Amino acid sequence: MSGAVTGTEKAWRVVLYVVAIGGFFFLVAPILAIVPLSFNDGQFLTYPLRGISLRWYEDFFFSGTWMSSIRNSLIIGVVAATIATFLGTLAAAGLWLADFPGKRFISAFLLAPMIVPMVIYAVGLYFYFAPFDLTATFTGLILAHAVLGTPFVVITVTATLSGFDRTLIRAGLSLGASPIRVARSVVFPLIAPGVIFGGLFAFSVSLEEVITVLFIGGPNQRTLPREMFSGIRENISPTIAAAATIMIVLAVLLLLSAEFLRRRSSRLQAKG
C-alpha cells in the first residue's frame, strides 16, 4: 500500500486549512479589534486611530477606581478558585472511587452551574443569600464564584483520574501506608496537573464573570468586569479598551499555563 498523498487528499487538506484559519479569525478578530483602540490617542473608541499613545494605560494604572476593581477581582478570584479547587477535587475523587446508586445524577447536579442560564442562577442566588445577609458582601461573591468554578475542576480532575492506575493505590496500601499517605504521596502528585488546570479555569471564570456581581455585589464589590460594564453604560472611554486588553493578556497567560500543565500531565501518564 503506497503512502503517497493523492491530489484529492492534498485538495481536501488545503480546504481544511482554509476553513480552520477562517474560523480562527472569525472567532478571534472581534477580540483583537479592541487591542489597537487601547493605544489610540483619540478620545473615542473609533477607527482610524488618531495616533499611538499609552495615555489610557496610564489612566488605568493611576486610577483608584480601576485599581480597586482589579484588586477586588484578584482577591475574589483567588479565594473562589481555591475553594472550587478543594471542593471539586474532593467531589471528583469521591465519584471516581465509589460506585453507588444515583452517581450519574450527582455528577449531572455538580455540572448544573455550567448549564443553567447565568441570569437565572444570579436571581436565585440573590433570594437565597438575602436572608443570610450575604448580598453586597465579598463572602457572598466568593461563594457564588466558587460554585461557578467547581464544575470545571470536577471535569478536569475526573479526566485526569480516568487515566490513573488504581493498582498504585492498592500497592501503597499493601505496603502498610495509610490511606492519607497514599493520597498525599501517590495520588495527588500524579493528578496535580489536572487539579491546577481546573483551578486556573475556576479563576478565569471568576475573573470574567459580571452577571452575579451585578445582582449580589454592592458598591464596595466592584470587580473589573463590573467596572467595564458600568463604564460602557455611563461614560465610554478608551480606558475600557486598555482594561479589556489587560484581561486578554491575563486570559492568554492562563491558557498558556493550562497548556503547559496539559503537556506535563500527558508526559506523566505516558511514563506511568
Image (tube, rainbow, N blue to C red):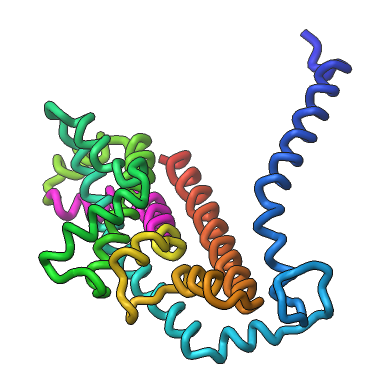
Of all residues shown, which one is farthest toward the top?
1
Q: Position of residue 59 (x, y in %)?
A: 61, 87
Q: Main secondary structure of the magenta part?
A: helix
Q: Position of residue 127 (x, y in %)?
A: 19, 58
Q: Position of residue 77 (x, y in %)?
A: 37, 68
Q: Is residue 260 left or right of residue 84?
A: right
Q: Which one is in front, 102 or 227?
A: 227
Q: Position of residue 220 (x, y in %)?
A: 33, 81
Of all residues shown, which one is farthest toward the right?
7
Pick the quarter of the image with the C terminus. Answer: top left
Q: Is residue 150 above or below residue 109?
A: below
Residue 9 in sight in this render: yes
Q: Is residue 246 above or below residue 41?
A: above
Question: Which residue lies at the image location 17% right of the left edge and 62% below the top edge?
Answer: 129
Q: Which residues are magenta?
A: 179-203
Choose top left, top right, bottom left or bottom right for residue 105: top left
Q: Residue 224: say if magenta.
A: no
Q: Residue 195: say if magenta.
A: yes
Q: Is residue 81 above or below residue 21?
A: below
Question: Which residue lies at the image location 77% right of the left edge and 82% below the top edge?
Answer: 41
